[in-house]
Image (cartoon, rainbow, N blue to C red):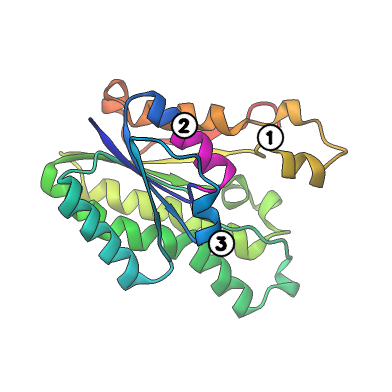
Amino acid sequence: MKKVIITGAAGSLGKAAAKVFLDAGYSVIATVSSAGSKEDIVSHSNMEVYQVDLSDEAGAAKFIESVIKKDKKIDAALLLVGGFAMGHIAATSGADLRKMFTLNFETAYYVVRPLFNHMMEMREGRIVLVGSRPALNAKDGKAMVAYALSKSLLFNLAACLNEEAKGSGVVTNVIVPSTLNTESNRSAMPDKDPSKWVTPKEVAEIMKFVCSDTAGVLRETVLKIYNNS
């Protein structure tokens, strides 16, 4: 049975991803940031849920080390932890930058670093990072500078990992969803048409595809999951 780590499993995308991968026969190793979030996840015989502060480098490394020791081989990882904040450059302080950097980059990097080394030893594995359209498009990013800058680092991280992994079966893909069609987003943007957005399940299905054997020939992939938004 293939094993996948899903961070941020208590979020809308994390819950959808867990279900899609469980339905596909994976064993899911899920992380949440709080005890309350852990209780909010529906239990499953093939899923283990851990409370981990992934912004703590030592704690994240210890978690990955323990998972590898227990499960021997990790086939894939979906790094879904993240945060969002508005703010043009005039309103964006260093503290704002550091908060977004921690939420969107460090939480991924601290998992990727030991996990990538494990996958390179195995000579195969799939890592999925979550980018954002504002990180690719300055027109969208100018009103959310700290968020856009922090997300842009994930594209650079993927490029570094893929360069180092050339010739192996270890691949890092970046998905870039548009607005997720969730209850909270519909409530926050009642004037928008949610049918133009993407559902968490649709994004999760694409993540399942890039982790599949069928997608084994893909390299350096950035997938823009925008629908019509």
Q: Is residue 140 above or below residue 125?
A: below
Q: Which residue corresponds to the image point at 15% horizontal and 46% vertical from the top-left?
A: 72
Image quarter hosting the N terminus: top left
Q: Who's the residue at 73% across and 59% down the image?
A: 143
Callout 3 amino acid: Leu
Q: Name the image quarter holding residue 157.
A: bottom left
Q: What element carries label 1?
A: loop
Dot placed on the residue nearer the N-terminal end, 2 or 3? 2
Q: Mark 3 points at which residue?
A: 149
Of the numbered discs in the image, which one, if any, rests on residue 181? 1
Q: Residue furthest top?
A: 214
Which quadrant would residue 25 be assigned to in this image?
A: top left
Q: Distance between the residues labelled 2 and 3?
A: 31 Å
Q: What residue type is labelled 1?
A: Asn
Q: Where is residue 37 in the image (x, y as percent from the top left)?
A: 54, 54
Q: Main secondary structure of the magenta part?
A: helix
- Observer-nearest residue: 111 or 8? 8
Judge whether residue 183 is colored magenta.
no
Mark 1 and mark 3 in contact (Cβ < 8 Å)?
no
Q: In this view, does 202 lie above or below 6?
A: above
Could you tell whether 4 is left or right of 135 in the image? left
Of all residues, the one furthest to the right in this rendering is 191
Give how far apart the Cα atoms at labels 1 and 2 are: 17 Å
